[in-house]
Image: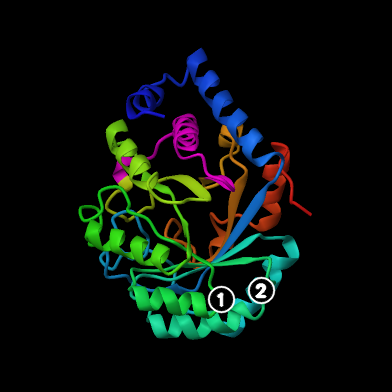
């Protein structure tokens, strides 16, 4: 799809007939690509500590830390959490830290966790930036992929230079890890041209699992007053992203929003532990979905586990 066509689709009035034609077009693409295969990816946030990158949308930013308590969990607690998630059903497992978390410690714990994951479950790192040697170490211990993106207004709303994010993405791919990508965090202040810049930036990479996430206005964070886009606008951006990227395995919306499944979303996230969009110490007591909740929402749209 050419950029001009994508831009026109993003400008679609969400109260018009054309909006429903757009989400139908995206849904048809997904049904052809994915059939009725649904996926639940689950994530454990393994530390809640002030982060020096100070992202303006994150509850863990050092200048506006708003999570209840400060803590880290070790391998034993993570493994217990993994076993619980497996009982409910997950396809991919994500282990998330703040950007300052020690890489060596992450590798040590991840190596232990990998032994408790079935071979069929992909293991994904969701951490700060890292070099090529680290990416190769991840692969050596059984990590299969990494979630890493260049966010909206990187270097402005965050203290991370965009080129550093881009270099880490390069390291992920050069190490033979799978890249998980998302257009995020979308807010009302982001223009359609900004949104398309990120969509077409991601289009250059081999992406099996794609996503769109709207920014959640967390009380106490610098971007709280900017508010959030509504579910119809989110669904429209999901549809355009899906049509442009054409992910081979799954299309996700985050946080789980049932309306967006009409646009061909076949994958949702379950979350426990720390969450940058939540102030609860454990997001399963707050915003986080459980795998069971995610599977139930997927089933409402006719998506089911492969087995």
- Mark 1 crowdedness (10 Å alpha carbons): few <14, some 14-19, many ≥20: some
Q: Which of the two discs, 2 and 1, labels the residue nearer the N terminus?
A: 2
Question: In the rendered image, which residue does mark 1 sit on?
Answer: 142
Q: Which residues lie in the magenta part?
A: 225-252
- Name above or below for residue 47 compared with residue 146: below
The one of 96 and 304 positioned closer to us in this rendering: 304
Disc sitting over residue 117 in the figure? 2
**Secondary structure that dominates the magenta span:** helix
Mark 2 or 1, closer to the camera: 1
143 vs 121, left or right, is left
Q: Residue at point 38% right, 74% down? A: 49
Rendering coords of residue 36 (x, y %) = 72, 40
- Residue 248 magenta: yes
Label 1 residue SS: loop
Residue 171 appears in the rendering: yes
- Residue 141 magenta: no
């Amino acid at each position: 799809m050419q950029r001009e066509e994508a831009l026109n689709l993003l400008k679609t009035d969400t109260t018009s007939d054309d909006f429903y034609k757009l989400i139908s077009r995206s849904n048809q693409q997904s049904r052809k690509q994915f059939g009725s295969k649904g996926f639940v990816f689950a994530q454990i946030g393994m530390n809640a500590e002030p982060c020096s990158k100070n992202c303006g949308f994150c509850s863990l930013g050092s200048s506006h830390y708003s999570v209840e308590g400060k803590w880290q969990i070790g391998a034993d607690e993570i493994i217990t959490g993994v076993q619980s998630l497996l009982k409910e059903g997950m396809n991919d497992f994500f282990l998330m830290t703040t950007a300052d978390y020690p890489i060596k410690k992450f590798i040590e714990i991840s190596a232990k966790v990998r032994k408790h994951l079935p071979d069929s479950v992909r293991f994904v790192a969701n951490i700060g930036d890292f070099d090529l040697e680290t990416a190769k170490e991840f692969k050596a211990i059984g990590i299969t992929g990494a979630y890493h993106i260049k966010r909206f207004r990187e270097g402005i709303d965050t203290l991370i230079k965009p080129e550093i994010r881009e270099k880490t993405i390069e390291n992920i791919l050069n190490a033979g890890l799978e890249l998980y990508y998302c257009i995020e965090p979308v807010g009302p202040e982001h223009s359609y041209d900004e949104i398309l810049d990120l969509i077409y930036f991601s289009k250059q990479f081999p992406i099996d699992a794609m996503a769109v996430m709207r920014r959640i206005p967390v009380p106490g964070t610098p971007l709280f007053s900017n508010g959030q886009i509504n579910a119809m606008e989110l669904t429209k951006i999901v549809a355009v992203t899906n049509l442009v990227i054409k992910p081979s395995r799954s299309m996700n919306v985050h946080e789980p929003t049932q309306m967006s499944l009409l646009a061909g979303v076949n994958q949702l996230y379950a979350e426990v532990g720390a969450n940058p969009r939540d102030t609860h110490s454990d997001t399963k007591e707050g915003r986080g979905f459980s795998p069971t909740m995610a599977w139930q929402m997927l089933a409402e749209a006719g998506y089911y586990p492969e087995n």
